[in-house]
Image (cartoon, rainbow, N blue to C red):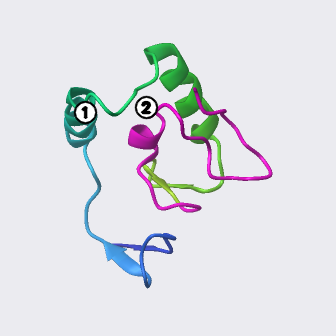
Amino acid sequence: MYESNCKSCLENVAVRGSITQDQINDAISKLAKNKKIRLVSDDIYEFRLLQCRDCKHLELGTTCLKCGCFVQIRAKLAGVGCPLSKDNRWKPVK
């Protein structure tokens, strides 16, 4: 069991498992079906994930401790950026 200090959680939580890549892909597929949600290209997506990979705020390879998001999902969304205000690792796509 793993203890997490995720910002989106109200208190420390014990993590018993992690989200799978299939679950992430399923969530992105559902987002892609919504015409109101814009997604970035695969090149931009991969660039954003590379920026997150070495970040000290990435936990368990999936969760951003600054905002509590799953980085693989947030990185696919156009119009959003890295939650680090001083060190914006990737710019939003307009």
The foreground one among 39 and 13 is 39
Question: Which numbered disc, 1 or 2, marks the residue that appears first in the sequence?
Answer: 1
Asked if the residues shown at circle 1 and circle 2 are in contact, with their CB atoms under 8 angstroms apart, the answer is no
Residue that numbered label 1 is attached to:
25
* Disc assigned to residue 35: none
Q: Amino acid at mark 1?
A: Asn
Q: Is residue 52 magenta?
A: no
Residue 21: percent from the left, percent from the top? 27, 37
Q: Which stretch did the figure color magenta?
A: 65-94
Residue 8 located left or right of residue 85: left
Q: Secondary structure at mark 2?
A: loop
Of discs 1 and 2, which sits in the foreground? Answer: 2
Residue that numbered label 2 is attached to:
76
The foreground one among 18 and 84 is 84
Against 52, is 93 above or below? above
Residue 86: percent from the left, percent from the top? 80, 52
In terms of image quadrants, where is residue 28?
top left
